[in-house]
Amino acid sequence: MDISLVELSRLQFAMTALYHFLFVPLTLGLSILVATMETVYVMTDRPIWRQMTKFWGTLFGINFVLGVATGITMEFQFGMNWSYYSHYVGDIFGAPLAIEGLMAFFLEATFVGLFFFGWDKLSKRAHLVVTWLVAIGSNLSALWILIANGWMQHPVGAVFDPMTMRMEMTSFYAVLFNAVAQAKFVHTVSAGYVTASGFVVGVSAWYLLKGRHIELARRSIAVAAAFGLAASLSVVLLGDESGYEASLNQKMKLAAIEAMWNTEPAPAPFTLFGIPDQQNHETKWAVKIPWLMGLIGTRSLDTPIPGINQLVAQAKERIQSGLIAYDALVKYRAAKGNVTPEVKQQFTDHSADLGYAFLLKKYVDDPLKATPAQIDAAANDTVPMVFPLFWAFRLMVGLGLFFIVGFGYYFYRASFRGMKFPRGSLIFAPAAIPLPWIAAELGWFVAEFGRQPWTVDGILPTAMSVSHLSVLDLLLTLAGFVTFYSVLFVIEMGLMLKYIRKGPTQDVDETERWMAAHAHRLRSADRQEPFATPAE
């Protein structure tokens, strides 16, 4: 396989996936925030909360539409650029994608129309149900996509059929409740909640700086800061769970993230700072925190974390085992399945390592003819590029800890200082809006780049997964995608900025607010509006 074809295919999918994920986290988080605001409106009858729901709902709608457009385009690439991957694992990968389309996407798309056009046609409670169904649909979309992705990270509930040359599902339950998929789902949606919270706080702070929409901005910061603080704490805790799953199922990824070249005595230290040198297998100027990596990665004091060099040696052994399975596979297919029990047993005993034999396809058409040097090269290919993984992970973690401090500050000012914010904090909040997106994109980079050289970890190498296209085809389609997505990006930013500058259609004035509050207190003296300002 032409390496330039593989790399261009990877570049194209990475570009479209990373661009699509600009929309996903904001959709996930805003849907919940909007539903929460409308819940307060239904509970209190305060017009300001209806105004907040409609304003932030408009921004959600713009983001939702463009997210759908980019997501559909991205899924087409499975058949266009990754046809052998689609053939090889379509029986498993296709199921959650189909369910996502039938259950989550249609639920989301159906009720989003009712959300926008049903304000005067539905009762308040019925409209609230619609809003929560939109939020649930948005999050269910993420669930099924991440189940599919989690299976690629940790393939379970499936076996390889030597006659069809495909993975076939044996347990949908195992695929659905894959521990890696579940950890990825809760971690990813929490990151989306952080992103939306940062967006709401930033836009609201800008309104306060401009002296516009004061009541909406104060309440929005109060809700988003509380939500963002809880979500940012969850991201850190759930990220720890993802790291623990990697120590069980993706040891090379964890070793590369840590730039751990050799197995160290348990519990292993965490490298806070260093310059990984992959050529010499060392980390220069390393600053380490004793025991921390062992505690995080293994949750014990006596379990070692394998180093890169030791894992490469294990990969070489698995390639040798995979060659035995490959030899049995050739005999199996030549005889159309009518092979001796010895050959069947040979394949059964070594089939778990068949994917490692496929790594040799990068160097030789027939893996059985691979030289020792080619086997060594294939084993070394199991090590992803360490430097970008090492620093992407640390930058992501640093941003995660920063979000906890930041949302904690705004929550404190909103809850205990009468929603009064120093001017410096109002200037900082809009400037910090991109940071959660950067952290989310870094997280996806660590997850996907760290899985290389596998499309499906341990089963299907990336070099085998691509379609047989020409380099020219890929360059033309890549240029087309870049143009298309650039246009969408300009449209997205233009619409979002337009409606942010415009703000709510009409501010709720003081008389209307007082009358609504007075009528509300007459109906139920013991019910109070959450997040009310001291003036009320």
Image (cartoon, rainbow, N blue to C red):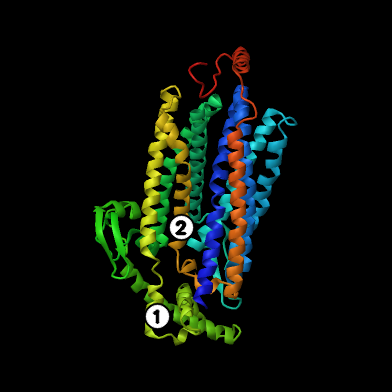
Residue ID for mark 2: 445
User: Dividing the picture into quarters, in which one does residue 294 lie?
Assistant: bottom left
Q: Is residue 110 above or below residue 332?
A: above
Residue count near mark 2 (Cα–Cα under 10 Å), binned few <14, some 14–19, many ≥20: some
Q: Position of residue 188 (x, y in %)?
A: 49, 49
Q: Position of residue 308 (x, y in %)?
A: 33, 67
User: Dividing the picture into quarters, in which one does residue 505 lie?
Assistant: top right
Q: How many marks?
A: 2
Give the residue drawn at x 66%, y 35%.
129
Q: Which of the labelled discs sits on residue 375, or is there none?
A: 1
What's the distance in space between the residues labelled 1 and 2, CA to CA?
28 Å
User: Dividing the picture into quarters, in which one does residue 312 lie?
Assistant: bottom left
For marks 1 and 2 on the same chain, the one whose residue lies earlier in the sequence: 1
Given residues 297 and 202, the one toward you in this image is 202
Mark 1: secondary structure: helix
Query: Which amino acid lies under the numbered mark 1 shown in the image of this protein?
Result: Ile
